[in-house]
Image (cartoon, rainbow, N blue to C red):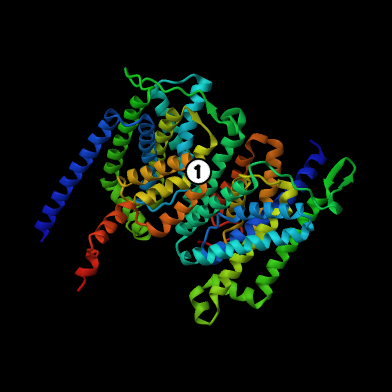
Amino acid sequence: MGLQFYVQNALGGLAYGSLLFLIASGLTLIFGLMRIINLAQTAFYLLGAYVGLTLVAHGTNFWLASVAAGVVTMALGLAVYSAFLHRYHADPLTSLLLTLGFALIVDDGILAFWGGDPRSIAPPPILAGSIHAGTLVFPEYWLAVIVISFAVAAILFFALQRTMLGVMIRASVDDEEMARGLGVDVNRAFYVVFAAGAFIAGLGGLLGGPITSAYPGLDGELTPLAFAVVIVGGMGSLSGALVGSLLIGLVNAFGKALFPELSYFTIFVPVALIMAFRPQGLFGRKL
Amino acid sequence: MTLRRAQDDGAQRRRWVVAAAGGFVVALLLPRLGVPTFYVSLLTQTWIFAIVAMSLDLLVGFTGLVNFSQAALFGVGAYAVAIAATRFHLTAFAPVMALGIVSAMLTAAIFGLVALRSEGVGFIIITIALNEIVWGLAYQWVSVSGGDNGITGIVRPHVGPFDVSANTGYYYVCLAFFAISLLLLLLIVRSPFGLVLKGVRETPRRMRALGYNVWLYRYLALTISGGFAGVAGVLFAWYNQFVGPVALSLDQSTQILIMVILGGIGTLYGQVFGVLVVVFLSNELSAVTQRWEMVLGVVYFAVVMYAPGGLVKLVPQLWRRLLGRRPALATEEP
């Protein structure tokens, strides 16, 4: 286990972690604003992958297809939010069970429509090669995923910190009642955040496809990772989601390499440490 | 006034005892009344899941802790049976039951150390993660848990002199454990300890101010609940004669919670009805359609939106509406 082992796994972990960010950012923002624990977030990811791979199979450009997949999951997310979820902001248990029920429906729908066979997804041809540095081999596409996720993170940070909408969202997080009193359209903030979360997860589905591939049950395997991210980073914090994603991505990669049978258990270590010393997470506020 | 209320209470209690005794007699006689074995087996499942649902109700309904890792505790009990039987050839009834209970309680005690660092929504999120991690262990640690294939070859043991390997015999074992668990849990929630738990559920801050160690009470409740979940897990492993990772998935945890909500949070006995509906529904549905998971998802929606108080409240309400009477509250208000 020389240097190569560490570099290889570190890069792989960063790529996987930046994918996790695409799921966890929505999870944390939706929770921070609406106190809804959206367990359908990984189902959106999986649905995005399937919609995307179908579009690609019909000749759509890879990037266009991933955006289209994001739009589909966003529309679905908005429909569920406006029909059911928006009534249950103050009630985390009810909204959680609704999103779980919705995830079941999406899962089973995917199984009915696309069947149970795993689908591998090819990266776009331009990025299909690998970078060779000495004995190190690193797929170009992984690098692209890292870049894209950081770009998404940058856009989210910019939108939250530098735009009027972002100001309104942050005001609603801090003090919803006061924000309403000052004339902020809090409901619009809710819709925008829920839509953004569903969109990014669906977009991530096809983007992550070449790394995770797509199969029924993938969403269940991603859920523990996404939750570990949110717990480590702090519930409701976007910077926390970014740092947490990369951390969990790295722990997961090294865990898989060193203890292949116990990789979910290795994620438990940072989660337990955080809970012991900083229950609100690295960047979180006390709940 | 107080006298009348006392008399009412006495009458009500007598009615409950009669109803419970009647229900128990019916449950005892059912397998002898020519009920098809398929339904006897579904009822056996009902008793098993009623135990784990009641164990969760102790947390949700009486302590105010919404635990999403109940399936992990249940599953640890089940895997304890499977691993003891297939690796250590330990199959005797009492030691295996004890092993299952102790391992589930230990797991709950470890969970408590981590999850009880926060409360409310934080507790929910952390228990989801904990459940998923235990599921991940069962799913990936192939050399111990058999991975996705699970562990087969579990044999139902003799209980004392009785051979319970047949379905009817095993039905009585599960019924007995259900009755004992219900009685024990009723004793617990009515004891001074149980009253403190209710206080912790209602106003943790006030209980702290009164000098109660809120953390410790929650911790004890979680550990006790783990023990009952372990009992159910052991019974489940013997019932199915197979254990796989589905038994401790997050979906399983959610289903147990749905059973509790559907039965009526904080009622204990109500869980029987919630479990009965879910067990029969999922079995009948999977016989009729391949898309029963989808239907189950719709059931989640229906339960949390239209029956948040559970069947125990919903059925009398519907009954009153059917008889054309208004709910008592609306008419008696001045």
Q: Which quarter of the figure is the C terminus of chain B placed in?
A: bottom left
Image quadrant holding the N terminus of chain B, namely bottom left
> Closer to the camera, B58 or B13?
B13
Left/right of residue B211 with respect to residue A237 in the rendered view: left
Left or right: A13, with A172 as reference point: right
Q: Nearer the viewer, residue B104 or B82?
A: B82
Q: Nearer the viewer, residue B321 or B178?
A: B321
Q: Is residue A262 above or below residue B328?
A: above
Mark 1: which secondary structure? loop
Q: Is residue B130 above or below residue B84?
A: below
The amino acid at mark 1 is Thr
Chain letter of the residue carrying label 1: B
Q: Residue A284 in the image: state x and y as whole percent.
A: 58, 61
Report which residue position mark 1 lands on: B289
B311 relative to A11 in the view: left or right:
left
Tell me if residue B109 can be seen: no
